[in-house]
Image (cartoon, rainbow, N blue to C red):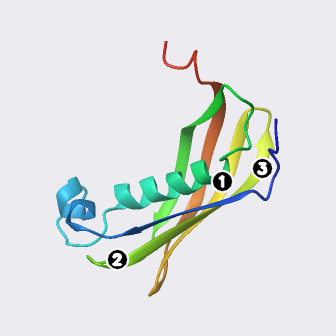
Amino acid sequence: MMGLQTGLQGAAEMVVGEKDLAIALGSGDVAVMGTPRMVALAEAATVAALDGALEPGRTSVGTRIDMRHLAPSPVGRAVKAQATLARIEGKLLAFSVAVHDDGGLVGEGTIERVIVNREKFGR
């Protein structure tokens, strides 16, 4: 793989809006960032970590997520996910992920992705 090595890092940021709330996503009835949105932000950080590191014609797809949502983030709060490629096992890539806002740690866990042929995937 071109440039694929453990330690690669990526980040993704957002500001919590109305569409990101648990109540809007159907994952709860409170006006704070929903867990599905936190997970999507964490996945975006894993994708960012791989930017430019895979061979041409390859991409990665998420296959396993193990995240803990530890603290609420209200509307208007800036949230950042940071992902680090922790393990490579053939086509399997395992990331450690942490999500923070200005109040501290919001979530943490692991996300696994698998390298696939972009053209053949989904056929």
Q: Which mark is residue 87?
A: 3
Q: Residue beneath label 1, please?
A: 49
Name the N-terminal-most of marks 3 and 2: 2
Mark 3: amino acid = Arg
Above or below 118: residue 107: below
User: What residue sits 31% from the left and 70% below the top?
Assistant: 16
Where residue 65 sits in the image (x, y, percent)? 53, 49
Disc 3 to disc 2, C-alpha distance: 30 Å
Is 9 positioned to the left or the right of 63 in the image? right
Closest to the observer: 24 or 9?
9
Where residue 64 sits in the image (x, y, percent)? 55, 43
Closest to the observer: 84 or 29?
84
Q: Residue beneath label 2, please?
A: 73
| Quadrant assignment, res 75 | bottom left
Q: Which mark is residue 106?
A: none
Is 33 positioned to the left or the right of 51 in the image? left
Where residue 92 sits in the image (x, y, percent)? 71, 37
User: What residue sits 49% from the left and 12% below the top?
Assistant: 123
- Work out whether residue 28 can be spotted: no
| Quadrant assignment, res 59 | top right
Nearest to viewer (mark 1 / mark 3): 1
Where residue 56 sits in the image (x, y, percent)? 71, 29
